[in-house]
Image (cartoon, helix red, strand yellow):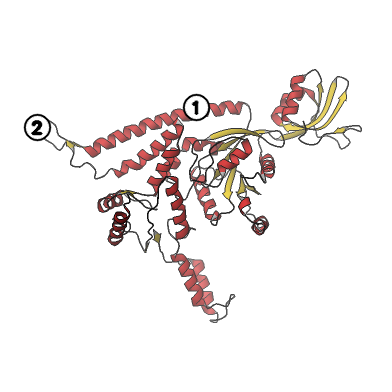
Amino acid sequence: MDLTVRPRKTRAALDSARKAASRPLGDEADGSPISEREDQRTGQARATAVDSPGLDADESLAEFRELVRSAGGEIAAELMQRRARLDPATLIGAGKVEEIAGVAASTNADLVLFDHDLSPTQLRNLEAALPCRVLDRTQLILDIFARHARTREGQLQVELAQLEYMLPRLTGRGKAMSQLGGGIGTRGPGETQLETDRRKIQRRIDQVKLDLDAVKRVRRQQRHRREAVPVPTVALVGYTNAGKSTLFNQLTGAQVLQSSRMFATLDPKLRAIELPSRRRVLLSDTVGFIRNLPHTLVTSFRATLEEVEQAEILLHVRDAASTYGAEQKAQVEKVLGELEALGKPRIEVLNKIDLLDAHQRDGLAAREQPRHEHHLVEVMVSAQTGEGVDALLAAIDKALFSDPLIETELRVPQSDGAALAAIEGGMVVHLRKYEGNLVRLVVSGPASLVGRLRKYRVRDDSLPNDAWDTRRHVEPGQR
């Protein structure tokens, strides 16, 4: 569906029109007449769908095509309709319904998919008029989620979303099937099959919610255990098929599934990584977002997306080679707003730079980066080749605000092997000197580890410029 609309006459547009009308006809910055530029603006507005702002009809159709292929479907035909308004009965009108029925019959199609959400009435009318099943966009996404859910938690979340979507769409089904009572005075209409189905679905929804509450309790307990040892969490978020799983594998060395299909991975994953400062963080991979992501999915996957809410930093992975990256970013931020996580510090990770030529890379690096209080920095990486990963780790290291780095001087007995091992494993050693049975060190490390070794600290203030006259220099990161 491509819903054509007339451009809204905002105050800014009216002021611009008045100024343009006061100028001579040919006095334009680009040399084109006013009427021509107005036609261009009007044509651009007509080519934009209301339900997919920022995406034209062809891009929206291409994305929907990828969804169908991710669900394992084979496309027999594609039809597009441009309308001024949606038909309340069938969405597309009686004439288009007849055309789709003919195409479905000639191609032996067993399923008609709509890149639009259908109301219960529209879905029922279309199923009655077409010779095959009908699914809308939300049902297709739910089917993809059901195919890719592997863990018990993921299956519960998908089932909850499916049941919540199905419940209001039972209207009109099973009216003729009523349970009549027996005996004198019990010949009423009885309970219809519709009411029975609704009650069964509602009971199942309540049970699934209880099971998901148990999952939340387990996650909360695991989070409390992690908080006992301060290890911050960094969450990967982004549009589906932006390369989050590939980047997760590149950073952690894991072997999670990475696929070009949408929503290839649903179940949450958590791995520890080491930063250049020797601090360790937990990297969390989350489900990808998409345009018009069904609200039932956001609600159902709340348990999984709690990692986003609890993360200290969000890595917003974006497809640098996409032609509509700005629209994808807007959709991700919309979902983050629903999760109340939009205010968290974010690092914009521009992925897939290996698909760009040198000119495109230079233009991407030279463009003015958006600045606001929650935006930290943009990092260009290639999760496939590993280019830019070191810069990304350094950016994460710099952005962490919990358990900050402290530079201090320690004097540790050589006999205390546990303390020396903790220093080598969790701190960066800048200077080292042996004085009899003591090892004198200038280190930088997390405040939590420095606190555990506070009995070995020489001073609490910063080191003087003339630290030692005779010292052996150790490169940062050298063990």
Q: Earlier in the sequence, mark 2 or mark 1?
A: 2
For badge 1, the amino acid type reads Val
For badge 2, the amino acid type reads Gly
Q: Secondary structure at mark 2?
A: loop
Residue linked to disc 2: 185
Determine crowd level at label 2: few under 14, some 14-19, many 20+ residues with C-alpha closer than 10 A.
few
Residue 49 at what x, y percent from top left?
Answer: 43, 59
Vertical relation: 412 (above or below) 181: above
Q: Secondary structure at mark 1?
A: helix
State the mark number for residue 218.
Answer: 1
Residue 426 at what x, y percent from top left?
Answer: 72, 29
- How many labels sit on residues? 2
Vertical relation: 455 (above or below) 476: above
Position of 418 with respect to 320 (left or right) is right
Position of 140 with respect to 19 (left or right) is left
Vertical relation: 155 (above or below) 385: above
Quarter of the image containing the N terminus? Answer: bottom left
